[in-house]
């Protein structure tokens, strides 16, 4: 609903758009929330607001200066990453600029507004993320491979939403490396000391 | 300035939906009763907006656009002001949104959205551009193959669904309706709404949930 209303931080919008690209149920939900926005707009009290007198003429002038737009929506990506994500990476998997964060885990932070952080994570097959909980909300979506934690098994397209009550140790499936998109609005809380010390440097 | 419109490029993918048949079918179902009549009127109007969009896309119809402008531009401006834009910015932005309605008219698909919904999504994205200077990631398009002409029955069904949703929204108890409106128009998170209204966060969440449940129920 907040995606539809346009009130989410950019990083959360990114994960929603990425998920909707792979999930038709959620796409349908998002479209119904859009209709609700439309219904609200339709019912808004128009008499309370006046347009400036030359408004229509000014708009026609704007139109005269601009070409007919082509379909701007991202086309379906052929790669592993859905196209909203490819826009941020600047390509597909091969173009991700990974940085090691220790224990074989790598990350790449995507450029979004600063009110939330979006990062890609690579967990090597069979490896674990350090045991952690959350100060805020962490939404994780699997793009490749799969991981398992205390809450279940997550494969491509699946989303896990963890808040401050969730304490988990995600472990990548042994068959292949797991690549996820993770969005957080506050730093993670690690249990053990070493990841804690490294945290400020890794911006995790 | 209106004269310059004649020189506009033709709609790239303009399609002739030939919706007059649908409009006629809509009139044929008329029944008596004042409430019923009002609903019929609203529904006809909704289909009229669809028809206007088709005219804009296929023949750059300025009269249709002017009518659409008169109806939607003030609503968009109001929406932007509620989201925190000042009157000047909102005016400018509303003009911009309406200009997009013209230039994107050929992309409007009446089997997927009502005109109000479609304009709402343009206005929302423009608001994010303008107030936050961010881009908004959009999902991939569905791939049903090459885009077919929308079936008239699908168009009518979707537009009527929007009608039912609109009515259900009007029928919501006002505390619930207010909060939904704030969540959409105020660019506020639930906790910001809590701050502004002084209501506990839990109350806000449950009211919004109740409202959505009612709307869902009405749509069944």
Image (spheres, rainbow, N blue to C red):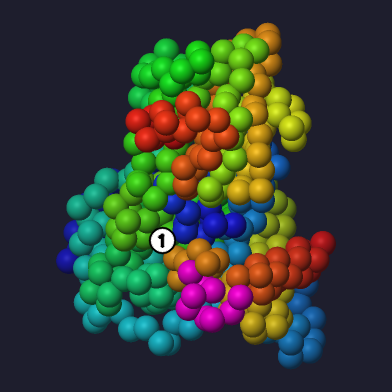
> Residue shown at 56%/44% (left/top)?
A134
User: Quadrant location of the N terminus of chain B?
Assistant: bottom left
**Residue that mark 1 sits on:** B123
| Residue A153 placement (x, y as % from top left) | 74, 27
Please rate how many residues cluster around mark 1, counting C-alpha atoms within 10 Å: few if below 14, some from 14 to 19, many from 20: many
Answer above or below: position of B220 versus A134.
below
Query: How many numbered discs?
Result: 1
Left or right of residue A2, residue A112 in this image: left
The chain that hosts pointer 1 is B
Quick one: which residue is furthest to the front in this view? Answer: A193
Residue sitting nearer the eye, B6 or B132: B132
Magenta-drawn stretch, dominant element (helix, strand or loop): helix
Residue A147 lies in quadrant: top right
Residue sitting nearer the eye, B20 or B204: B204
> Residue shown at 60%/64% (left/top)?
A36
| Residue B175 placement (x, y as % from top left) | 64, 82
Part of the protein shown in magenta = B192-200
Residue sitting nearer the eye, B202 or A22: B202
| Residue A15 placement (x, y as % from top left) | 52, 39
The answer to whether residue A113 is magenta is no
Residue sitting nearer the eye, A182 or A67: A182
User: Quadrant location of the C terminus of chain B?
Assistant: bottom right
> Residue shown at 27%/77% (left/top)?
B87
Give SS at disc 1: helix
| Residue B38 placement (x, y as % from top left) | 68, 84
> Residue shown at 42%/87% (left/top)?
A47
């Amino acid at each position: 609903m907040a995606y539809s209303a346009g009130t989410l931080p950019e990083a959360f919008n990114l994960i929603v758009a990425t998920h909707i690209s792979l999930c038709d149920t959620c796409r349908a939900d998002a479209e119904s929330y859009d209709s609700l926005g439309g219904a609200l707009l339709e019912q808004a009290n128009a008499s309370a607001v006046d347009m400036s007198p030359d408004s229509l003429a000014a708009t026609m002038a704007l139109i005269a200066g601009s070409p007919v737009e082509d379909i701007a929506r991202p086309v379906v990506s052929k790669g592993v990453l859905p196209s909203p994500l490819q826009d941020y990476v600047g390509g597909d998997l091969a173009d991700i600029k990974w940085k090691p964060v220790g224990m074989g885990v790598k990350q790449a932070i995507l450029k979004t507004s600063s009110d939330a952080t979006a990062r890609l994570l690579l967990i090597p097959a069979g490896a674990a993320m350090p045991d952690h909980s959350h100060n805020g909300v962490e939404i994780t979506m699997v793009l490749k491979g799969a991981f398992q934690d205390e809450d279940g098994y997550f494969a491509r397209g699946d989303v896990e939403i963890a808040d401050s009550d969730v304490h988990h140790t995600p472990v990548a499936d042994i068959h292949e490396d797991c690549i996820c998109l993770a969005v957080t609005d506050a730093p993670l809380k690690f249990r053990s000391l070493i990841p804690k010390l490294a945290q400020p440097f890794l911006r995790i | 300035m209106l004269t310059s419109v004649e020189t506009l490029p033709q709609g790239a993918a303009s399609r002739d939906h030939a919706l007059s048949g649908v409009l006629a079918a809509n009139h044929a179902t008329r029944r008596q009763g004042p409430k019923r009549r009002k609903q019929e009127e609203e529904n006809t109007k909704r289909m009229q907006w669809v028809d206007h969009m088709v005219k804009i896309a296929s023949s750059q119809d300025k009269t249709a656009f002017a009518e659409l402008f008169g109806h939607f531009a003030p609503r968009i401006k109001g929406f932007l002001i509620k989201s925190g834009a000042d009157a000047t910015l909102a005016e400018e932005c509303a003009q911009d949104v309406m200009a997009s309605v013209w230039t994107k008219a050929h992309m409007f698909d009446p089997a997927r959205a009502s005109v109000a919904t479609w304009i709402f999504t343009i206005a929302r994205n423009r608001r994010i551009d303008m107030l936050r200077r961010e881009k908004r990631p959009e999902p991939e398009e569905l791939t049903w193959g090459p885009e077919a002409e929308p079936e008239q029955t699908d168009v009518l069904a979707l537009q009527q669904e929007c009608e039912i949703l609109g009515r259900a929204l009007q029928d919501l108890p006002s505390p619930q309706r207010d909060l939904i409106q704030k969540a959409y128009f105020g660019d506020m998170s639930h906790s910001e709404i809590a701050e502004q209204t002084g209501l506990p966060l839990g109350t806000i969440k449950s009211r919004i949930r109740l409202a959505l449940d009612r709307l869902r129920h009405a749509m069944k």
